[in-house]
Amino acid sequence: MVKITDVARRAGVSPSTVSYALSGKRPISDATRRRVQAAARELGYRTDDGGRFRSGARAKVLALAVPMRPGIHVPVVTQFAVSVVTAARARDHDVLLLTQGEGDEGIGRVTETGLADGVIVTDVQLQDPRLPLLRSCSLPSVLIGVPAEADGLTCVDLDFRAAGELCVDHLAGLGHRTVALVGSPPEVYVRRTAFARRLVEGFTAAAGRHGLASAALPCGTGRDAARAVAERLLRDLPALTAVVVHNEPLVDPLIEAFEQLGMRVPGDLSLTAVCPAPVAAAARVPVTSVAVPAAELGARAVHLLIRKLSGAPVPGTTLLPPRLTERASTAPRGH
């Protein structure tokens, strides 16, 4: 079967441009449209017009786009996938997993073949390259994440900006005057992943509002990376007494690294995290945290997508408010 990606390759354009040119949903230059149409004719490409979507038949399958990119933490991805599968099965739908790392080819294949009735998209970037295709194609979609321009899209996520603010507000309320954010791996910020960028914005805004000295650093995973970032923070911020962690695998290695450098948690250093609640509760020092509600986000995404498939109205963007749970890792400054 000829795919939309084959037409795109033949015409020298992106799959989203092929979709625009053949659907007429966005303005495309005449020259480009003619080139795409010629490529489609040469390859024998057929659009949805004679297929599943026109006939009204349903696959009873939802696609889940989970790109396996550098910096992705697989246990969190697994939590999202399990929650989507569980919620979909409760509504008599199966789930097709799309794991291609970049671009919109996987979504294009699902659209053109009618393998799924709709798609849930994760690891959303602020300027996500999949958005043009999602806006133009006939496949209903829900994003777990919010891009910079969300008009015309259905999105659900934790309010990560508010989560960053909430952690800093808690630490400032305990009297801490110098705080640091240990963030996601560098590649997550390079590709402008929405949730990571928004948490940094919230952290920075709250630190400024409270008049705190602050720094935000990305960090890889593993004990060596944790030790290196702890040493750098204590060198650059000698008055450091509080840390926010947005990098789930680093919670225990960071506590260990700071302790080896003479900073006891919470006696000398208060530590908060934005991570799944079980990770925070099971840390070597139970960590005060804002939970990432993977199960709730997955279930809500399925609920929104099923509503869209039924023709019911849905909100554009749904942000879940962050909730902070205090544990043993935070204390008043100098406690």
Image (cartoon, helix red, strand yellow):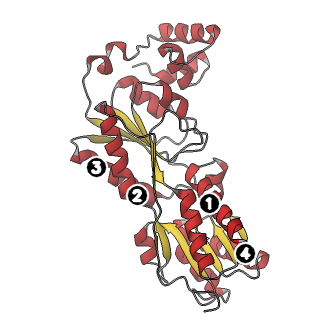
Secondary structure state at the residue bearing disc 4: helix
Secondary structure state at the residue bearing disc 3: helix
Where is residue 150? Give x, y as percent: 54, 38
Up/down of 152 relative to 190, above or below: above
- Disc 4 versus disc 3: distance between alpha carbons? 42 Å
Residue, disc 4 = 233
- Dot placed on the residue nearer the N-terminal end, 3 or 1: 3
User: Is 236 positioned to the left or the right of 205 in the image?
Assistant: right
Question: Image point 58% across, 15% down: which residue?
Answer: 27
| Amino acid of disc 1 | Gly
Residue, disc 2 = 294
Mark 1 or mark 2: which is in front? 1
- Disc 1 versus disc 4: distance between alpha carbons? 20 Å
Q: Residues within 10 Å of mark 2 (few under 14, many from 20)?
A: many
Residue, disc 3 = 87
Residue, disc 1 = 202
User: Is 3 positioned to the left or the right of 333 in the image?
Assistant: left
Question: Image point 29% across, 36% down: which residue?
Answer: 61
